[in-house]
């Protein structure tokens, strides 16, 4: 699994949020490297902890900006965030039981998060906010 380089396709166009998304990519790469070096289990707990915090702070940030700008897809987006939060919590709980295969599973989950949530779902508020002058909002 090659490391992920930040690409234009990942960009929402909202600078502050793109920066936070880059933080997620860093965690994916950190996990990927650890798996390659057969120490996936060593970083699993810490990455899940970082992700649990991330799903609070980053999602709140996105939702606040969507709200401030009256983004019409807010409720639907919040639902998607809740699903991601729940998945992280489930994995966190599972990691306290048994970690067999979990690092690989987490890696696939995070790739899906990047490609399905950031590229598909976050892109929608990106275009909306950007068209309303929101590029440099924080
Ligand atoms: Fe989002």
Image (spheres, rainbow, N blue to C red):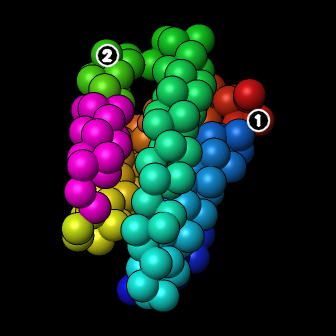
Q: Is residue 107 above or below residue 22?
A: below
* Observer-nearest of 111 and 39: 39
> Whole-percent x and y of residue 77?
34, 27
Residue at screen point 35% across, 22% down: 78
19 relative to 74 in the view: left or right: right
- Quadrant in the rendering for residue 58: top right
> Whole-percent x and y of residue 71?
45, 19
- Circle 2 sits on which residue? 75
Q: Is residue 92 visible?
A: yes
- Quadrant in the rendering for residue 85: top left
* Observer-nearest of 10 and 60: 60
107 relative to 102 in the view: left or right: right
Rendered-image quarter of ligand 1: top left
- Circle 1 sits on which residue? 136
> Whole-percent x and y of residue 38?
42, 85
10 relative to 138 in the view: left or right: left
> Whole-percent x and y of residue 108?
28, 66
Q: State the predominant SS element of the stretch in magenta.
A: helix
Disc 1 to disc 2, C-alpha distance: 23 Å
Residues in magenta, as a range: 83-99
Residue at screen point 71% across, 44% down: 15
Q: Is residue 135 above or below residue 69?
A: below
């Amino acid at each position: 699994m090659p490391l992920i380089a930040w690409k234009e396709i990942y960009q929402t166009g909202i600078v502050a949020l793109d920066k936070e998304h880059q933080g997620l990519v860093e965690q994916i790469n950190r996990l990927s490297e650890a798996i390659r070096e057969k120490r996936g289990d060593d970083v699993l707990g810490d990455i899940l902890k970082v992700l649990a915090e991330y799903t609070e702070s980053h999602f709140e940030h996105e939702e606040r900006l969507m709200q401030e700008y009256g983004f019409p897809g807010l409720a639907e987006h919040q639902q998607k965030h809740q699903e991601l939060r729940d998945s992280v919590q489930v994995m966190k709980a599972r990691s306290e039981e048994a970690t067999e295969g979990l690092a690989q599973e987490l890696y696939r989950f995070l790739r899906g998060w990047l490609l399905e949530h950031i590229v598909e779902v976050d892109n929608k508020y990106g275009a909306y906010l950007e068209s309303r002058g929101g590029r440099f909002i924080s």
